[in-house]
Amino acid sequence: MTERTLILIKPDAVARGLTGEVLRRLEAKGYRITALQQLQASTEQLAAHYAEHEGKPFYQPLVDFMLSGPVVAAIAEGDRVIEGFRSLAGSTEPTTAAPGTIRGDLGRDWGEKVQKNLVHGSDSPESAEHEIGIWFG
Ligand code: CMP
């Protein structure tokens, strides 16, 4: 079923010049990018986006990391794009994410409290619509 997802290219990936590589993999897999913008995230956007993680030990480091530079937000569309992009991204921990994935090929640990894992993708149709509202209004 055609669906859409919200993708964030996080500040580590933007700073490392990996925006094009992430978008290339997304398009090469066959998904369509229907909206794209680079922006400086606000604390309000991050509080809404990461509400489920509030209170966890990595919450403040995560917010600080996400404020540390510009992010790129994208909406991608296609059949099963939510699962498809999460599969392209790989598992959360970049050190052990499978080779062949964005995190596995391009990410690693840097000795910090937060995992700088390059990208975010929505995990359900409900969170996709919620997150698209946060980043695209
Ligand atoms: P993301 O998929 O954007 O969702 C929450 C983010 O928090 C996650 O990617 C990581 O960047 C970070 N994160 C999740 N779990 C941990 C953890 N145990 N330690 C540090 N950072 C984490």
Image (tube, rainbow, N blue to C red):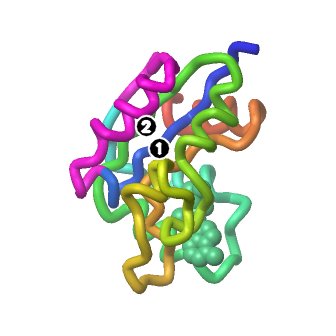
Q: Quadrant of residue 13?
A: bottom left
Q: Is residue 38 above or below residue 118?
A: above
Marks 1 & 2, CB-CB < 8 Å contact: yes
Question: On the rendering, which quadrant does ligand 1 occupy?
Answer: bottom right
Q: Is residue 42 above or below residue 24?
A: below
Is there any visible trace of residue 39 in the rendered image? yes
What residue do we see at 45% from left, 20% from top? 33
Q: Quadrant of residue 72?
A: top left
Position in image of residue 70 (x %, y %): 30, 50
Q: Quadrant of the N terminus?
A: top right
Picture disc at residue 73: 2
Q: Is residue 19 above or below residue 116?
A: above
What is the CA distance from the residue labelled 1 to the residue labelled 2? Answer: 5 Å
Q: Does residue 31 show up magenta in the picture? A: yes
Precedes in sequence: disc 1 or disc 2: 1
What residue do we see at 51% from left, 20% from top? 31
> Disc 1 designates what residue?
8
Q: In terms of depth relative to the viewer, which is nearer, 10 or 136?
A: 10
What residue do we see at 51% from left, 26% from top? 75
Q: Amino acid at mark 1?
A: Leu
Q: Amino acid at mark 2?
A: Ala
What residue do we see at 60% from left, 62% from top? 92
Position in image of residue 81 (x %, y %): 63, 27
Badge 2 density bin: few <14, some 14–19, many ≥20, Cα 10 Å: many
Q: In terms of depth relative to the viewer, which is nearer, 40 or 26?
A: 26
Extent of the magenta region: 14-36
- Number of numbered discs visible in the structure rendering: 2
